[in-house]
């Protein structure tokens, strides 16, 4: 007859199993969190550049303008290249830049100049 004593702790197998489960969860979540942070930065920069493009296009339309026109500026540490062209009765303004993932992005807006 075997008498079992009460153990007041975990065995090595139990500790290693729980440690490996926690480590697996951490190693799975870290790349996802990193990717989410990058995408958040890309969306934030895209939104900021779109707002600046809108403001620049409005100023461009209000003042006398000669199309085509190109401008270079820095928005939040990113070099942005603006291009303005006539598209019939509209003025097309585009912003082009390289995002944090080293991909070229372009956003275009149209404006209607008052005559």
Image: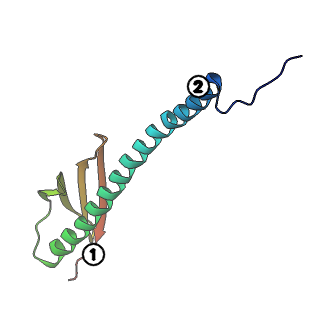
Residue 82 in the figure: left or right of residue 43: left
Location of residue 52 in the rendering, given as x and y in whole percent from the top left corner: 22, 66
Numbered circle sitting on residue 71 = none
Numbered circle sitting on residue 16 = 2
Location of residue 61 in the rendering, given as x and y in whole percent from the top left corner: 18, 74
Displayed quadrant of residue 112 = bottom left
Q: Residue at x 48, y 33 (%)?
A: 27
Location of residue 78 in the rendering, given as x and y in whole percent from the top left corner: 19, 51
Mark 2 to mark 1 CA distance (whole Å): 67 Å
Tell me if label 2 and label 1 are in contact, CB under 8 Å: no
> Quadrant location of the C terminus?
bottom left
- Residue most extreme to the top: 1
> Quadrant location of the N terminus?
top right
| Nearer to the camera, 103 or 28 | 28
| Nearer to the camera, 21 or 103 | 21
- Residue most extreme to the right: 1
Residue 10 in the figure: left or right of residue 96: right
Location of residue 95 in the rendering, given as x and y in whole percent from the top left corner: 24, 56
Numbered circle sitting on residue 112 = 1
């Amino acid at each position: 007859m075997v008498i079992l004593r009460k153990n007041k702790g975990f065995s090595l197998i139990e500790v290693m199993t729980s440690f490996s489960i926690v480590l697996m969860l951490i190693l799975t979540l870290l790349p996802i969190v990193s990717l989410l942070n990058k995408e958040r930065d890309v969306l934030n920069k895209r939104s900021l550049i779109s707002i600046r493009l809108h403001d620049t296009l409005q100023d461009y339309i209000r003042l006398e303008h000669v199309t085509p026109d190109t401008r270079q500026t820095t928005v939040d540490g990113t070099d942005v290249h603006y291009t303005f062209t006539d598209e019939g009765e509209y003025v097309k303004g585009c912003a082009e830049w390289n995002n944090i993932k080293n991909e070229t992005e372009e956003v275009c807006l149209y404006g209607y100049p008052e005559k």
